Amino acid sequence: GAGVSQSPRYKVAKRGQDVALRCDPISGHVSLFWYQQALGQGPEFLTYFQNEAQLDKSGLPSDRFFAERPEGSVSTLKIQRTQQEDSAVYLCASSQQGDGTDTQYFGPGTRLTVL
Amino acid sequence: AQSVTQLGSHVSVSEGALVLLRCNYSSSVPPYLFWYVQYPNQGLQLLLKYTSAATLVKGINGFEAEFKKSETSFHLTKPSAHMSDAAEYFCAVRGKGGKLIFGQGTELSVKP
């Protein structure tokens, strides 16, 4: 079956613009995670959903970052008033179980560049 | 709190040589540990995971890792490197709620 997909793959934004990044998890997967990967760094956790419930948003760096998963499948990560420090690859991962303990499958990521 | 340290941001080996990528963890509870590989412009692919069963874990592409509690280590090895193994490798520990806490990564280069 299809893996995790993300769109767009590349996004260039001018500082101050709002962006929306989409994640399509593997069908039927209950858990969905967002990570941010800065250049030359390991991914860092942003937020976690179990179905439509956002159970952990402790990694969101500021209130400019907002994520949703309204129907428990597709998720959108929105960044308002983008800043240069937001430039990174944003990775989405999904896992089958609701407790987030099983294997996470990653999408290819969205590379965001803020000019 | 859990954390992971990867020793060496860059490792270079010759084709056919042993690959050894080092990972040490810190965890107040029995850890679940993972190794992921990332090829350029791609997402992360799971190589193997330790979930408190056998301490020697075999993964895909000939990789394996050994969990050593006394050394708080989970080093990744492969007996013979291939050119196709050149990539970025990440060690991770499972944190609260299932989130993954990653190390800084080790870039593996393979020389012909």
Image (cartoon, rainbow, N blue to C red):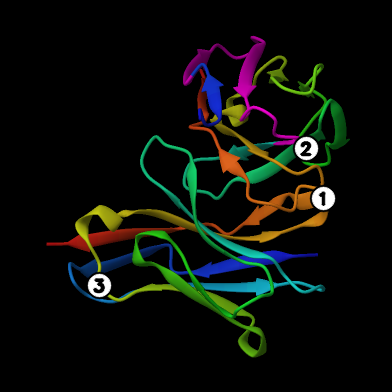
Q: Does residue A58 appear anywhere in the picture?
A: yes
Label 1, on which residue? B97
The residue singled out by tag 2 in the image is: A48
Region rendered in magenta: A9-32
Distance between the alpha carbons at the discs numbered 1 and 2: 8 Å
Q: Is residue A114 above or below residue A92?
A: above
- Label 2 near label 1: C-beta < 8 Å? yes
Label 3 chain ID: B
Disc 3 on helix, strand or loop?
A: loop
Foreground pick, A14 / A11: A11
> Is residue B96 or residue A28 the one in the foreground?
A28
Classify mark 1: helix, strand or loop. Answer: helix
Q: Which label sits on residue B41?
A: none
State the image coordinates of residue B14 (x, y, percent, origin top left): 18, 69
Q: Are marks 2 and 3 in contact (CB under 8 Å)?
A: no
Instruction: Report the quarter where the N terminus of chain B lies.
Output: bottom right
Residue A10 is one of the magenta-drawn residues: yes
Residue B33, image x, y percentages: 63, 65
Q: Is residue A21 left or right of residue B104?
A: right
Three-letter code, disc 1 = Gly
Asked if badge 1 and badge 3 are on a common chain, one would say yes
The residue sitting at 48% across, 32% down in the picture is A108
Image marks 1 and 3: residues in contact by CB distance under 8 Å? no
Q: Give me the residue at 43% from left, 62% from top.
A: B9
Nearer to the camera, A95 or A56: A95
Direction bottom: furthest residue: B70
Q: Disc number at residue B80?
A: 3
Residue A52: image location, x then y, percent: 84, 25
Q: Name the quadrant containing residue B59.
A: bottom left
